[in-house]
Image (tube, rainbow, N blue to C red):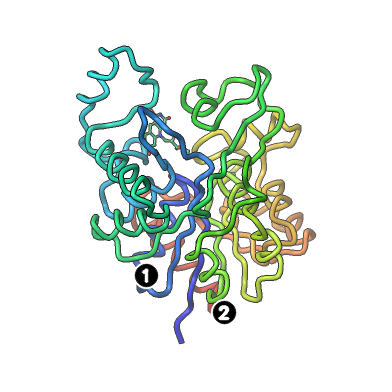
Amino acid sequence: MNTEILALAGGVGGAKLALGLSKLLPPDDLTVVVNTGDDEEFHGLHVSPDLDTVMYTLAGLSNPETGWGIQGETFNALERLTAYGADTWFGLGDKDLATHIMRTMMLGQGNSLSDVTLSLSRALGVAHDIVPMSDDRVRTIVETEIGPLAFQDYFVKHRCEPKATAIRFDGGAAAEPSPGFKRALESSDAIVYCPSNPYLSVAPILEVGDVREKVGHFPGIRIAVSPIVGGEAIKGPAAKLMAEFGIEPSCVDVAKQYAGLCDCFVIDEVDRGVAGEIESLGMRVEVCNTVMVTEQDKIDLGCRMIEIATE
Ligand code: FO1
């Protein structure tokens, strides 16, 4: 019998594991639900950074240096926009702009973000379903020492420098999970939390409508991969945020975020020593290599997820 997996993903880290899973599972057995709290409008265009990172990664188009954007990009349009006096701190490449033009046009014609994402990803040859967490607008706002900042302002414009005091997800409670997300919550055998930032990438997904409650009562196995390895974030500001919230950056504290929502917590070999501490939170612990550098690393970790889900 096939095992159907629902993967919850943010940007780069989530996309890596989603790629590994997509190399192992047929399209009917994998749904990747992606954070859209980072979505933003630039130059009148709707940009969905995490959806695009996952989509470009599964399409084999992502930029290997950054993990986001398209490989071999040029920035001619952005240069023209700069010359016209536009604010161009967000690096939108020429090829990437075509995605945002198409998305904005289709949304303007009344299509949902789910429909648009399906259309764009199939056009890029992605056979697996990538779905937004919601078709409704949810916005991640980071409260900082210099005031509230929309996610991309915090992350890109201010390079995560201002001290964060809280994070909120505007519109989350009133939002509905997307149809694909609802369907996968009903039909999947396992939920996999990809190694994405638990505060900025996974939390917004859990804050959509009744998702936290549904995941809390999910009948199948829930597996989380720690994005913190050896006290450091593989990528991005997770460790910095934890320190600012007075939490010592470690995979134990990531596990605490998922208490009651996770059955099996996967940590890296280097963190083997804290397995007991995590087990005392009521989760089973699995230890393996979680740092995904090569494509084989992504497939190996995907394989481990499937083994755990089918045990
Ligand atoms: N991240 C940056 O650090 N700098 C950028 O200029 C930038 C541009 C960009 C353009 C399109 C896109 O889809 C993503 C982009 N990202 C950029 C990444 C983005 O900020 C993501 O939200 C983060 O990687 C968090 O997942």
Tell me the distance, in whole angstroms, between the alpha carbons under discs 1 and 2.
Answer: 16 Å
Ligand 1 shows up in the quarter that is: top left
Q: Is mark 1 on a helix, strand or loop?
A: helix
In the picture as drawn, the residue positioned furthest to the right comes out as: 280
Please tell me whether residue 9 is drawn above or below residue 232 in the rendered image: below
| Residue 37 image label | none
Q: Which mark is residue 24?
A: 1
Residue 141 lies, in percent from the top left, at 61, 33
Residue sitting at 22 percent across and 38 percent down?
Answer: 95
Q: What residue type is labelled 1?
A: Leu
How many numbered marks does the figure carry?
A: 2
Q: Contact (CB < 8 A) between labels 1 and 2?
A: no
How packed is label 1: few (under 14 Cα within 10 Å), some, or many (20 or more)? some
Residue lying at the far bottom in this picture: please name it. 1
Image point (60%, 59%), residue name: 224
Residue 270 x/y as whole percent: 58, 49
Rendered residue at 32%/36% (across/down): 65
> Horizontal placement of 91 versus 246: left or right?
left
Disc 2 element: loop
Vertical placement of residue 92 versus 296, above or below: above
> Of the numbered discs in the image, which one, if any, rests on residue 311?
2
- Give the answer, above or below, for where 129 lies relative to 295: below
| Circle 2: residue type | Glu
Q: In the shown orientation, is residue 228 left or right of residue 4?
A: right
